Image (cartoon, rainbow, N blue to C red):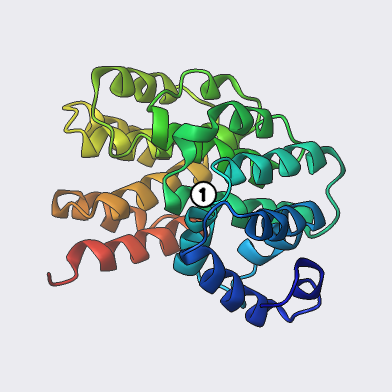
Amino acid sequence: MPNSCELLSLEPKELGALCLNLFRSARRTPQNSEILHTLLESGALLRLLCNRDALSLQQAVELIQSTFLVDRVTDAKLLRNVVHQSSRFDAAGPAAANELLAVFDAAGLGARLQTLLVQLLRTRDPKVRSKAALLLLRQSGQASWALEDPDPRVRANAVQALWEIHTPSAREICQQALEDPHHRVVGNAIVALLRAGDPAAAAHLERIARHESARFRAAAAWAAGIVADPNFEPLLRKLAADPDSVVRRRAQESLAATTAPP
């Protein structure tokens, strides 16, 4: 086994394979602790977990979970580094942060990291903020605070996180989101309410399908395609003849999804 410094000179794929092999059966020995410390401090572990050419998402999940045998808060240390660097991201920073959050999401680690994830909502990069919001909300089911965020991506992801949460509080939040000025937020709220069986959801879909803004009409076409309810076929056929080309394209795509044979 290479020592901790020699590991850093390896190619990413080779390093990934070695780390998976090491930490699958690792325990808290001085050598393993030193290797993990070096990987964390050098940023090599962060880069490795974010590199889909070196590790698949499933392998990245396995690796982060395996490191808990050596250090039970590896995930918090990684995310803390991202939080501390978020105000000075270089060009690759936001992409790396999003990849790391995707790994944490797949590993179901959101509940462990809520405090740090909330801090990521303050970063300047909207994609990082929206991904952090989505991960947070999948764990907590609470979105009322996110609806006050000035970034529509955060608000839209906050509502999207409630698509499969059919509680009274989630439904109330989605009903509030229907008044949002951004089409993506409203479209996601309608999808959530349709999936929850809200009796007024179809009427809200028809309302935005008649909206003066083409973006809202496109959101209506998109939402109808997401739920793929054949009852919305007449509405989609109307939208497929809309004057706006984006609305027509969205409606045609949703028609294909709605009318496709099971």
Would you identify the image quadrant in which residue 178 lies? top left
Find disc 1 in the rendering and name its residue.
68
Q: Nearer the viewer, residue 224 or 133?
A: 133
Q: Residue at (41%, 18%) from the top-left corner?
A: 176
Q: Nearer the viewer, residue 202 or 90?
A: 90
Q: Neighbour class for label 1 at 10 Å: few (<14), some, many (≥20)?
A: some
Q: Residue at (20%, 55%) from the top-left corner?
A: 233
State the quadrant of the N terminus.
bottom right
Q: As displayed, is residue 20 above or below residue 119? A: below
Q: Nearer the viewer, residue 134 or 174?
A: 134
Question: Residue 242 location, x and y as percent?
Answer: 41, 55
Left or right: 48 in relation to 89 = left
Question: Residue 58 location, x and y as percent?
Answer: 44, 66
Would you identify the image quadrant in which residue 39 lies? bottom right
State the quadrant of the C terminus.
bottom left
Q: Residue at (79%, 52%) from the top-left corner?
A: 41
Q: Check disc 1 and give the amino acid type.
A: Phe
Q: As displayed, is residue 191 above or below residue 54? A: above
Mark 1 element type: loop
Left or right: 205 in relation to 250 = left
> Can you see residue 243?
no
Q: Residue furthest front?
A: 30
Q: As displayed, is residue 127 above or below residue 143? A: below
Question: Residue 207 location, x and y as percent?
Answer: 34, 32
Question: Residue 194 location, x and y as percent?
Answer: 23, 37
Q: Residue at (49%, 34%) from the top-left corner?
A: 112
